[in-house]
Image: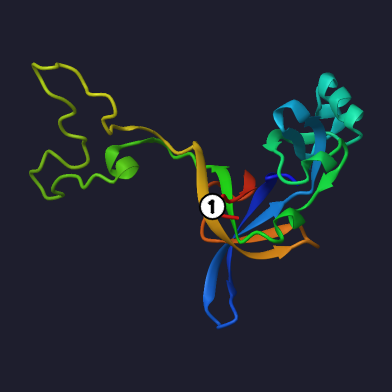
Amino acid sequence: MVKALLGKKIGMTRVFDDSGKAVPVTVLCVGPCAVVQVKEDEGAVQIGFDERKRKNTPKPLQGHFARAGVTPKRILRDVELGDGGGECEPGLELTVEEFAHCSAVDVVGVSKGRGFAGVVKRHGFRGGPASHGSKFHRTAGSVGPGTSPGRVIKGRKMPGRMGNERVTSRNLKVVRVDGARNLLLVKGAVAGSNGGYVMVRKAENN
C-alpha cells in the first residue's frame, strides 16, 4: 500500500538461522503508523508515528489530527504510495505487516553526533610518528598549494563536525517480521542511537 513506514531503533542482538549460524540483526519497532492526510495529486500520504501529549501539541496540529480522526503524533512524514494506494484514507492504521513479503529494505536514520573531530578520527588519516621528537602526530598537514591557486581546494578533507547526518543503509536483508510486537529484524547495522527515529522503505529490488 505504501512504500515506507516510520519506526524507532531498539538496538542490536543476534538470532540463529536454520543451520545454526549466528546472524547479527538490528531490531526496529516499525509502526503502527496512522494515515493523517492523503495527497492524491502527489501520489503520497502523510503518516504519523509515536504518540504525543495533546497539551504539548500546537493548536493548528491538533486540528490537523482531529480532521483525520487520529491522536496527536510526534513525527510526520510524507511517503510515496505503492500498489493499491487508492485504498488509503485518513485514520487508517499501517503496521509492520507491510513488509511481511519483502526480502530487503532500506533504512534511513541520523548517525550519532561525534562533535568536532580531527582528520584521524573523521577521515581515517594515518597520522605521523608517535615517537619522541616528532612534531607531526595527528595534524592534517598541508591543506593546499601556495602560490597557485593560493587557496584551499574545495572538498579537501579537514577537521570539522562529525556525524549527526542523514544516512541510508540500503538492501538490508529482512530476517524476521513480528507483527504481534511491531518488530522488524534486519541483518546488519543501522545508523543512529538506540531510540532514534528511522524510516523503513521497501528496497528497489522487491
How many numbered marks, from 0 up? 1
Q: Nearer the viewer, residue 103 or 197?
A: 103
Residue 111 in view (yes/no): no
Q: Quadrant of residue 175?
A: bottom right
Q: Quadrant of residue 163?
A: top left
- Secondary-structure class at tag 1: loop
Colour logic: rainbow
Q: Where does the image place residue 95, in percent across and percent down from the top left?
A: 78, 52
**Amino acid on which disc 1 is placed:** Val
Residue found at x 81% / y 31%: 37
Q: Where does the image place residue 92, in percent across and percent down from the top left?
A: 86, 42
Q: Where does the image place residue 137, in percent across and percent down from the top left?
A: 18, 42
Quadrant of the image for the C terminus? bottom right
**Label 1, residues with CA under 10 Å away: few <14, some 14-19, many ≥20:** many
Left or right side of 181 for 28 = left
Residue found at x 48% / y 39%: 113
As displayed, is residue 98 above or below residue 61?
below
- The residue carrying mark 1 is 190
Residue 185 in view (yes/no): yes
Residue found at x 53% / y 75%: 22
